[in-house]
Amino acid sequence: MGKIPIGNFGEKEMNKLYQDPQTDTGSNCPHCGGTRIVSDRQTGEMICANCGLVVTDTIMDTGPEYRVFNLQEANDRRRTGTGYSMSIYDKGLSTVIKGDKDASGKRLDYETQRRMRRLQRQDNRSKVNETHARNLSIAMAELDRMASELHLPQNVKENAALIYRKALKEDLIRGRSIDAFVAASLYAACRLQKIPRPLKEVSKVSKRLHSEVAMTYRLIHKELKLRPPVDGPFKFIPSIAAKLSVNQPTEQLAINILKKADEIKALTGKDPRGLAAAALYMACQETKEKRVQRVIAKAAGTTEVTLRNRYRGLKQALDQMETTPEDLVLQV
């Protein structure tokens, strides 16, 4: 049948259509040339809102065929598994064979169950029989443990898994420790994502020694040609300030001191943690918060000698700019 004009709609009919108004402005009515085409999901029709012409009477419903009334029912009816993830050894595309019941829920007979158990056994063997898959299954479990202990976000975990897979593809792990490569990949991902996690902290939760993790990171950095951004002292201020339990004005004053010294390039080539510790020590002196050098240096992971040298450098930079920490206190 052709397209039949159904005349003018009444007020009730138009209100019924506009309960779910989905106007398609990309097509025109062939009768009057109107652009307001209303989709009625209940009847499966597309109707011109100006003249009432049924433009088409077959609309494909792309939604689910079931009805849900709360979030729990919606989650129970999901038919998809976990998303595609690099941090899962098979990227989340695994298969599961269960041989107890058929599609209708009836229990299988003994012979079919025996055959399905055999298929399940062969499927499990094929997953871990290859060296590549077995390596990834061990590495991704260790990566998940370390990322959880370091409280790292999911994007860092995914980036670390990608770096590890690249190292495995380049055959860098042969004859070396899997745990060391996982720790080095995680530290490299933190550097690339600008997450303040020092190598000592990553090595502390690893099963390998700090020297081995550092050597492995240098190997990954060289062979994979990674280009992580240079760490600045600003991003270490919050973590050190949290360990010292200093107030927010003191933390902000330390950041202002570093910003002022950076204007004349006084921070170039210096250890960022030493600079952060020195700035916090100078800020604590101005705000009358008593923190000794030994405690600040320990919280920053540096030495007291480094802290004193960086402190003198910051002092000289502020004197050169004719600025005192008292002037910066007013900006906090």
Image (spheres, grey):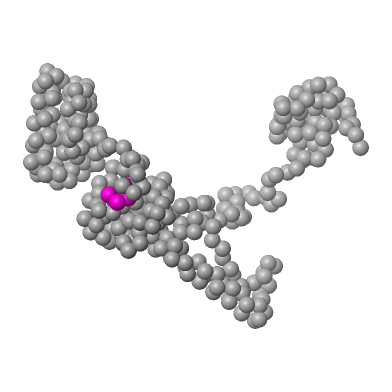
Question: Where in the figure is residue 44, as x and y percent of width and height?
Answer: 79, 40
Can you say whether 65 is above or below 18 in the image? Answer: below
Q: Position of residue 43 (x, y in %)?
A: 80, 40
The location of residue 49, given as percent across then percent down, is 78, 26
Quadrant assignment for the N terminus = top right
Relative side of 79 to 17, left or right = left
Quarter of the picture containing the C terminus is: top left
Residue at screen point 11% across, 40% down: 306
- Viewer-nearest residue: 279 or 19: 279
Whole-percent x and y of residue 113?
A: 63, 77
Is residue 111 located in the magenta-colored stretch of the structure? Answer: no
The residue lying at 49 percent from left, 59 percent from top is 90
**Residue at 56% across, 56% down:** 81
Looking at the rendering, the stretch of residues picked out in magenta corresponds to 217-221
For this view, does 65 lie left or right of residue 271?
Answer: right
Q: Quadrant of residue 277?
A: top left
Looking at the magenta stretch, what is its main secondary structure? helix
Picture quadrant of residue 182: bottom left
Q: Is residue 4 left or right of residue 60?
A: right
- Is residue 250 depicted above or below 65 in this figure? above
